[in-house]
Image (tube, rainbow, N blue to C red):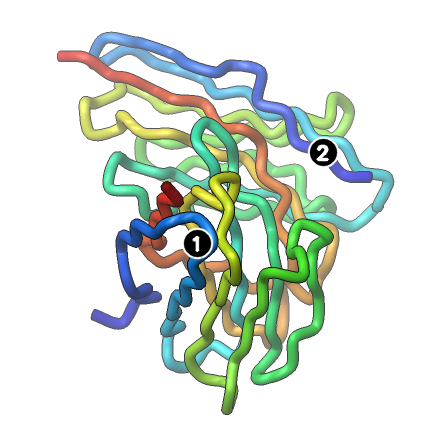
Amino acid sequence: AQKVTQAQTEISVVEKEDVTLDCVYETRDTTYYLFWYKQPPSGELVFLIRRNSFDEQNEISGRYSWNFQKSTSSFNFTITASQVVDSAVYFCALSVDQAGTALIFGKGTTLSVSS
Amino acid sequence: DTGVSQDPRHKITKRGQNVTFRCDPISEHNRLYWYRQTLGQGPEFLTYFQNEAQLEKSRLLSDRFSAERPKGSFSTLEIQRTEQGDSAMYLCASSLGSGDYNEQFFGPGTRLTVL
């Protein structure tokens, strides 16, 4: 069975602080896909990134960076110099089907950034 | 606006009533997904269509739930004899469904409240 664990329920930081959101996944499949989505207060899930299991390269996009480590089954997400607009619920998700069917989501981490 | 749209955005109904939600995917996307999200949880997969064919259904989709996607365009999700436990946000997503893994893009959701 597949599972995604986001152990941090809520995180509060002050603007300009760096923050890391943890994600640990479980799967026996050798090919899988990992995702991060952002859900702002408006409610619409916004796709941030997808990583394939065979590509462990870390990725940076502006203030966002992702650290994928197969050895620890983790796919952590770091926001550098956080801003108030980063306040949202962040979900990590897993899919084991290349056809792109069910996403298995974690319970999410609520990030609150205060000014 | 070329994103996924859902209608209505909010629905309040009394227990025992039937409700129907509509999802319009991104126009060139041939895959369509339904998820349910309850408070404090990540979205949970319900069902998935490839064009007009319903290819996968979660065990969460009880007999009271039915989804259709006539002509492979918009989709409807009907809940019969609603129960208070059906109160949730119902999310629709779509993806291209060709070539390499395709990300799912989510709509704003329909929030259902069953009194």
B28, above or below B111, in the image: below
Where is residue B4? Give x, y as percent.
Answer: 34, 66
A99, above or below B58, in the image: below
Query: Mark 2 falls within which chain?
Result: A
Graded by Cα atoms within 10 Å as few (under 14), some (14 to 19) or many (20 or more), the crowding at tag 2 reads some
Residue B84 in the figure: left or right of residue B58? left
Taking depth in this image into account, of A2 and A61 the one nearest to the observer is A2
**Residue at image x 36%, y 44%?**
B113
**Numbered badge on residue B91:** 1
Q: Quadrant of the N terminus of chain B?
A: bottom left
Taking depth in this image into account, of A76 and B19 the one nearest to the observer is B19
**Residue at image x 52%, y 53%?**
B35
Q: Secondary structure at mark 2?
A: strand
Where is residue B78? Give x, y as percent.
Answer: 49, 66
Given the image, on which type of amino acid does mark 1 rest? Answer: Leu
**Numbered badge on residue A3:** 2
Taking depth in this image into account, of A4 and B52 the one nearest to the observer is B52
Where is residue A62? Give x, y as percent.
Answer: 31, 36
